[in-house]
Image (tube, helix red, strand yellow):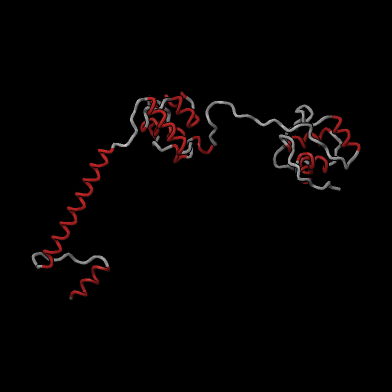
Amino acid sequence: MALPKTQVAETPLMPHATAAWLVDNSALTFSQIAEFCGLHILEVQAIADDTAQTKLTGRDPIRAGELTQAEIDRGQENPEYRLKLSRMPEQQRRTSGPRYTPVSKRQDKPKGILWVIKNHPEITDNQISKLIGTTKNTIAAIRSKTHWDYANLTPIDPVTLGLTSQREMDALVSAAAKKAGIDTSPDLGKLGEDRAALVADLQAERVAAAAAAEAAASGEVAAPEPTTALERGEALFRK
């Protein structure tokens, strides 16, 4: 009889591999193994019958420190006994180094590297390596145009490619520019000049349009053919 399921989420680090080991090396019931590993009893049955989709290599929970032989013995003596995890599996800590990039996006890294090199030459190879998660050799090959696929590379923003976040990109650009002594503050004088030029262009277009309309009304030149539905309606109304 299957043991009632509990809400405890404490399971071995590799539950399927642990179940495979227990099936081969103990007399525990499938229910006990399923309960301990957090699996369905049918999964354990499939592992025992070698009908699982993937053939698993057993993982010894005793050597891993997650189960004791005494605990296994208690379970073998009493089919209703629920095995207890000796300790929670240690969480793997990420070591310092290049960031991990999914396999599906790794082919896009050279495009992102090329974009950074072209648009932000102040960013160092070490910074690019940490941002995108690549090697300095790859960056050097792209800088020197000796990369094996350089002729086919198109520079694309690494944020667009999903290789980094916009916040990380902006922070790196700002830090690199500050270290290189580059002023990234907006040129207010240039913005003012651009705004004045835009206003002048709009005013000139408005004056020209008014003059053309006045000339057309006085019959000096033929009025242009109406193109929009509104213009056609106004033309019919004037008639």
Which residue is depicted at the point 85% across and 41% down? 29
The one nearer the camera, 81 or 146, is 81
Establish if 170 lies above or below 211.
above
- Across and down, in percent, residue 4 comes to 82, 48
Residue 166: x percent and y percent?
Answer: 45, 39
Report which quarter residue 160 is drawn in.
top left
Q: Quadrant of residue 123?
A: top left
Image-based side of 137 in relation to 206, left or right: right
Asked whether residue 48 is in view, the answer is no
Question: Residue at (75%, 28%) from the top-left corner?
Answer: 64
Q: Nearer the viewer, residue 176 or 66?
A: 176
- The quadrant holding residue 231 is bottom left
Q: Position of residue 54 (x, y in %)?
A: 70, 39
In front of the other: 226 or 105:
226
Please, is residue 228 above or below residue 163 in the view?
Answer: below
Residue 24 visible, this orientation: yes
